[in-house]
Image (spheres, coloured by chain):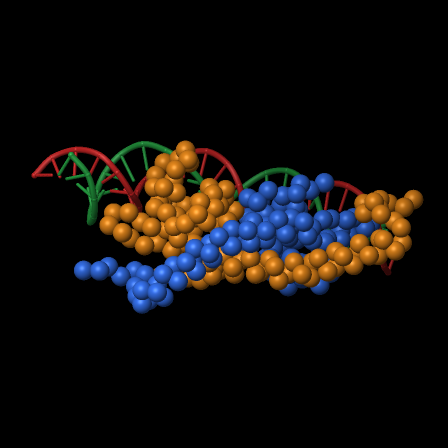
Chain colours: A blue, B orange, C red, D green
Amino acid sequence: MQSPGNLDDVFAALADSTRRGMLERLSRGPANISTLAQGYEMSQPAISKHMRVLEKAGLIHREKHGREVRVSVNTQTVEQARDWIAYYTRFWKQQFDAVEHYLDHHHVKNSSTEEQP
Amino acid sequence: MQSPGNLDDVFAALADSTRRGMLERLSRGPANISTLAQGYEMSQPAISKHMRVLEKAGLIHREKHGREVRVSVNTQTVEQARDWIAYYTRFWKQQFDAVEHYLDHHHVKNSSTEEQP
DNA sequence: GCTTTGCATAACCATTGGGTTATGTTTTAA
DNA sequence: TTAAAACATAACCCAATGGTTATGCAAAGC
């Protein structure tokens, strides 16, 4: 049973283009591991390791069907990561807009890194 | 000039609670590095390294003011990461909902990992 | 002027991460 | 029943990460 995924593991799992590619592939529906491995020039154990990382992060769910493993995305964990960013983005943009507003009202655009002599 | 940040670097930067803590702190407004370091029991060079990671990822912007460095969040990069997740979340949830719908119509809930004998 | 403050940088160390080859196990196909 | 397919696991290698101490350096304070 994969944990809901702490953010350290979740973001670390997303920090690899191979794993992101697999998740993108999974947006077209669940797939076997060998299917997910298509197009990646790396050994099968390497793929296996990536799956472990994604699973430990709680980003995917595995289902054994005979000798194959069907993988699907755990939307809860994915939304958890998105929500962390989305929550703070609100405040970050807010202050960003405030600076824009300030610059706009003082007609000093393009001065972000300038030093006044 | 920091790059717009490729997703590898961005997510890797987010995969550390110290750095996420600093970004959270920055949601209350820009701050000096020494201010950001408050509450973390680690050496100053360690903090410096974290700042470099955040900057290389394009997540923050530095502004020298005398001997101090004012740090603020680069909202573009942050939104870029959020958008990647948000975009695929749509499809992931879609198929997730489809499965839910299927299970609902066949009255076979709680059967995700069961094997029928 | 001299000292302290706020950083950066270098050199080092232990751990982790992403890859490999080799091997094993279970299920399916011939 | 024997072979092949679809995985997992172990042992290893090398580069990257996150921390340290030591040092340097420019700006501020006294």
How far across and down, in percent of the image, does residue C26 sit?
Answer: 81, 44
Q: Quadrant of the N terminus of chain B?
A: bottom left
* Res A13 seen here: no
* Res B14 seen here: yes
Nearest the eye: B20 or A86: A86
How far across and down, in percent of the image, does residue A67 sit?
Answer: 79, 50
Relative to B73, is A13 on the left or the right?
A: right
The residue furthest front is A105
| Residue at position x 59%, y 53% in the image | A82
How far across and down, in percent of the image, does residue D5 sit?
Answer: 77, 57
Residue B113 image-quadrant placement: top right
Nearest the eye: B52 or A80: A80
Nearest the eye: B48 or C29: B48
Nearest the eye: B97 or B13: B97
Q: Is residue A37 above or below residue B18?
A: below
Q: Quadrant of the C terminus of chain B?
A: top right
The residue furthest right is B117
| Residue at position x 39%, y 43% in the image | B36
How far across and down, in percent of the image, does residue B56 sit?
Answer: 41, 55
| Residue at position x 76%, y 57% in the image | B97
| Residue at position x 32%, y 54% in the image | B63
Relative to C25, is A23 on the left or the right?
A: left
